[in-house]
Image (cartoon, rainbow, N blue to C red):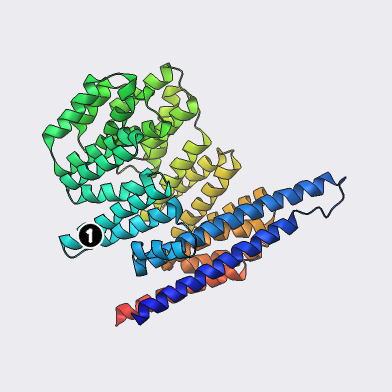
Amino acid sequence: MLILSSQVSTFYETLIQMNCLVRFFSRFRLFSTLPNIPQSNISLRRKQAAREKKRKCTFKITQEHRFRHLIESSGKILGPEATLELFDKVGRKPGVKGYNALVEICIAKARVAENEDIAIEEMGKVFHLYESMRKQGLELEEQTYRPLLMYTIDMCMVEEFQFFCHVIKEEIPSSTARLGYYEMMLWLKVKDEEKIQGLCNYIAENDGKDTLDLRENYLLALCESARKENILEVLEIMDIKKLSSVDSVAKIFQTLGRLLLEPVAEKLLLDFRTSDHEEDNITNFISSYVVSIPDLSVEESIKKFKDFHEKLEVLPSSSSHEKLILHSCALLKEHTCSDGELDQLLLLLEELNDTSYWNDTCCRIILCCIWNKRLSSAIDLCKLLKDKLQIDALVMKVLFDKVFSQIEESESNHLQTCMELLSEMKDKLGLFPSQKCYDSLLAAACADTNDNSQNAE
């Protein structure tokens, strides 16, 4: 009891400190908006306004992140009911994101529960959280109910799934179409052939606009399975050009790639092309298809990507180029990179014009060079990045965020290559890494040493 009291006291102190910070920054924002420069200096006023906007945005994001972290911490220690009671006492409401965090905690506990009674108790807590949201006037979102539905699906709890679906439909009638996705996922999980075929028949027999969203969600769930026959049956009947979003169509092409259904993919792509569909979308569908094909080498992926674009007479977009490069780099992390494969990645990088895409993909290829100990290529790319960004401090920030911090989180056998790269960057490019960068790599090296010591014991 003393421990719980101490924990509650600590959370009260944290919340009080947080409220003080909120009041302080509110006053700070008030003072910072007072005019302190000449009215005629428009340029300075614009810069000040931009800085103020950025400061407000940063403060809001930081505040939301800390508040969510506080809810997660208290939820894990005190449980959802006590957490809600605690926050209510200090006059703070969790909000949708806070409730989502509490729901995820309950479902995580249910998944590791040693017996069914504990799991059911955790599901009951989730239901009470939904009730609390309703009383607070918050609307259930998919991110809120998805963890519960996926848990009942994974555990093959048909009755529980149907009960919760009924509750959600009653609360949010507009969710009916999206719940169709989870319904199909359930029947696929429990292998109920009659139900699966029934939903496929529904797709085939109902071609009206009022049923399109529901049929789309049935199809998207079906595409996550390996049931080629059912998928082909539906695609033969349903016009996927009418689907609600480009993302939904891209998922279908991912499935066609995963299941090696190239003739179907080609037919659908030609259909999009002849119907004057946007070229950016078509190139996105091509990349979604190609990167999903299993056991395809980097060279084969790039060749197929280019062949499809030539056949359809469309130009690759920056986003599709990026998707292909990122996929290729992921493949090259698993096996040694050949000179030809690296050269092709560099050629693809040259074709990228969009700066935001270029920076990310350049850093990913630098990572690939580190994984494969291609130091000279990594230096060349760092030079390109320096020439493009022109500000050394910005170059080092980008490299730290997108390259060196990733090494810290991955296998530490690349640390030596990183240290050599840092040395070369200083000598050849005049780029001086920050202490933060060295500290990051040192921490990774120490962690690796500890792991090796424990394994030796």
Q: Is residue 345 above or below residue 216?
A: below
- Residue 342 relative to residue 271: left or right: right
Mark 1 element type: helix
Front residue of 400 and 103: 103
Visible in this render: residue 373? Answer: no
Visible in this render: residue 54? Answer: yes
Residue at screen point 39% across, 57% down:
101
Q: Amino acid at mark 1?
A: Glu
* Quarter in which the C terminus is drawn: bottom left
Q: Is residue 421 above or below residue 131?
A: below
Residue 312, position in %: x, y?
Answer: 43, 23
According to the picture, the residue beneath numbered tag 1 turns out to be: 121
* Quarter in which the N terminus is drawn: bottom left
Front residue of 102 and 222: 102
Front residue of 171 and 306: 171
Q: Is residue 79 above or below residue 341?
A: below
